[in-house]
Amino acid sequence: MTAAYDEMASGQGTIRQHWREFMATIWSMPAAQLAERQARARAHFGEADAFLEIYGKERARPQWSFDILPLILPESEWRGLAAGLVQRARLLDLILADVYGPQRLLHEKLVPPYLVYANPEFLRPVRGLAQAGGAPHLHFYAADLVRMPDGRWRVFNDRTQAAAGVGYAVRNRRVLARTFPEAFRTAPVQRLAPFLELWQASLQRIGAAVHEDPRAVLLTPGPYNDAYFEHVYLARELGITMAQGSDLSVRNGVVYLKTLEGLLRVDVIYRRLDGVFCDPLELHEESALGVAGLLQAARAGNVAILNLPGSALIETPAFAPFLPALARKLLGEELALPAVTTWWCGQHEPRAAVAASLERFVLRPTFAADPAPIDPAQLDDAARAKLLAELEARPEAFTAMERVAHGMVPALGPEGVVPEPVMLRVAAVWHEGIWTAMPGGVARIVSGDALYRSTLRHGGVAKDVWVLAEEAQELSVPALRTRSPTIRRAGAALRSRTADDLYWLGRYAERVDGGGRLLRAALERMAGGGLGPRDVAEIALLARALHRAGWIDEAVAGAPAGGAMFNAGLAAAASGRAMKEALDGLRRLAISARDRLSLDMWRTVNHVLAVGGEELAFEGDDPDGLLRALDDLVRAIAAFAGLVSENMTRGPGWHFLDMGRRVERGIGIARLAGGLLAGPAGQNDLALKLLLELCDSTITHRTRYPAEPRPASVLDLVLGDPANPRGLLFQLRRLYEHLEALAKDGGAVPALHAAATLADRVTEFAFARIESGPDTVDLAPVLGLVDLVAQRLASLSDSIARSFFTHTQAAKPVGFTVRPPRDAVAA
């Protein structure tokens, strides 16, 4: 095989002109400093989008790493590359328009019918569908390129379905600029932001042609998709709403987004869902990811879908041999950016040539979204004979691609700068009839099967791509003039599903916090050396509270304090089933609501999950490491709560997230009080002190009541004080306030009424009366109260779900009006 092209060094052993300044910067830095920058960049790469494992061990997400040495292209070379990319995008769009329209290319035998009609990506319901807003079939196009040994770029794969890449490119650029700013000081690197602005303007223009007040959404398969990070990232960068199929509904031929405010019209859908799954009525009937009736809404001209479903038809490499002739037919031009030599074996001559020299090629299935390569050079005689027999029996099922020597790019390895094989993904977008290429892309160091597979789901080592500008210039993005929107200071378009996710995210965060505090309190007493009678009694009380809250089982709770069974059970609880379920719930909901969380909030959740997944370990008889991890866990949850309180706009998202926290904390306080106070009367003093400690109220009580804690004063502070943020009544009052803010047209009256009633029940409780004398205390009414509150809060949570999340018509009570809880204004 011919020697691979070296991006940095010429054949004469000199550094190419456009690499010299950058490499001078690299060589001027000590190796240790470069290694530190590399490590820092990779840490940022992981921190910003570490969508933690939810597939399970059998389906791991792609593993990405990052290399701080970019792929550098001079502007003179990029101009030709961009022109070829744009020409190819125009050509593929015309082919799609013909295949789904008059099909002249099939009648004139310029395209083999087999590549259309046998292709599973040929979606017959799309035939004759004219896009709304004048949008083309193909609105966004990407191509994977390889550098040939002669220095020419060739297309390895066309990506017309729902190609990833732009979000990764922007993220790569930001990480590199942050960790290696010296490299940009002397390099005139073209910016990527104008391309995103052009893309955003294109979506707005298309939407404005559909409806006067357009709304665009990014349709994602959801958090289980490999590229979900990019979906979140792009939705934010493009200023559009991210939605799953379940968030959308078609009514009377119009697509709507389901929100707490009702149905909001959608005019443009940027599709990141495979076309065949977009509409279960007309396409894949078992799809749970799409929107029933979506194609009918598109036919009616009420929504533009970008790219139009069925565009993946042209992705099959078997089309590549026919593109040069199609370019001459449709464009009257020679194809400027052809593919690597590719032969479809469904024709006699290509099949014979491939069979005669099998080792020159790598074979791929003709119709496969991400085909695994078949390398004849790696097969033994028996396997090769079997392959030849299959090729003879079903030649149309195979496409042969010449064996490629990928271009080599410099990468930073343990021993310094080393050459590695690279693949480049570039992209272009359509705007008002003109295609524009993004000045950059995503470069990947590839190896193994990934050399012949082009989807980004296989991971690899990512690199930024620099296009150097010869002079100061930038894409011109004309502003879209629209009428001024109606000013709104409340009621953002929050998806109903997201409201549900945020509510339960708040509940799981408080669940983890409550468990961490209880476990920490018990372990602190175990770690204090020899256990005295007081320690044993306190641990027994905490064990009962832990069992009541579901953190340890009954056998462990009843075991002797400090015994082997109790110690092991307590340690296991820190990383056991209950904690794992709470952390799994937190992980799942944070991922699902990722587009509603700021980067700082996401990082904090990641830290909570890292502590819970890696640090909650107990080894030997030294609980110090576990205590440190629990301290870290509680602090991280507190940081998350602080960000919720200080950084989130007081809109519906904040209401639901904080409401979840208040419900869970209220249940936790009620169960904690019930668990601690249900013991023998002789342990009441210890129970009261533990209640103050676990509710962070010791200092407040000591300030108000210098004497020894008494039941009335403690319980009034922890249960009945509306100004105590760790107290029960505070949670009930905040819960009512959230429901009052969210109530519309009486839809939330049942939950609102229940919250007001429950808050009044606690407000009216006379805690001073539980003590009729210094030694006479009746805790039975208190225990009844906290049990009632825990039960009612659980029922109220169900009522909240019915009112806001299930989209069913709630029964409206007759004969009463909801009044706020007593003293709510003063509270």
Image (tube, rainbow, N blue to C red):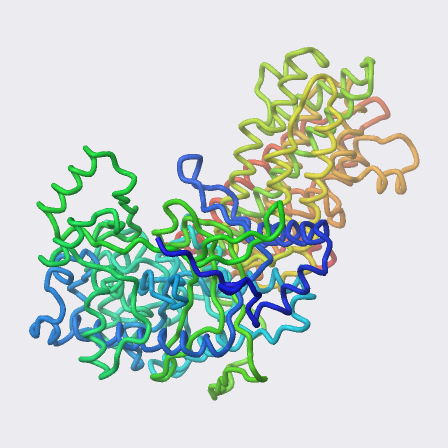
The quarter in which the C terminus is drawn is bottom right
Q: Check the image and name the residue furthest to the front.
A: 12
The residue positioned 15% from the left and 54% from the top of the image is: 353
Q: 368 above or below 213? A: above
- Residue 41 x, y percent position in the rendering: 63, 54
Query: Where, by quadrant of the figure, is residue 648 drawn?
Result: bottom right
Depth check, front residue: 702 or 497: 497
How many tags in the picture? 0
Is there any visible trace of residue 809 in the rendered image? no
Residue pictured at 62% horizontal, 50% vertical: 416
Name the residue nearer the viewer: 300 or 662: 300
Query: In the image, is 550 to the left or to the right of 312?
Result: right
Expressed as whole percent of the image width and height from the top left, the position of residue 674 reads: 66, 29
Residue 21 coordinates in the image, percent (x, y) = 64, 69
Q: Nearer the viewer, residue 286 or 393?
A: 393
- Displayed quadrant of residue 102: bottom left
Task: Decide which of 543, 528 is in the foreground and name it.
Answer: 528
- The answer to whether any part of residue 485 appears in the image is yes
Judge left or right: residue 523 versus residue 734. right
**45 vs 540: above or below:** below
**Within the image, what quadrant is residue 263 found in?**
bottom left
Instruction: Tell me the residue at 32%/76% (across/down).
Output: 336
Vertical relation: 318 (above or below) 364: below
Q: Looking at this rendering, what residue extends furthest in the right direction?
A: 706
Q: Position of residue 203 (x, y in %)?
A: 41, 76
- At horizontal 41% and vertical 60% (from top left) the residue drawn is 164
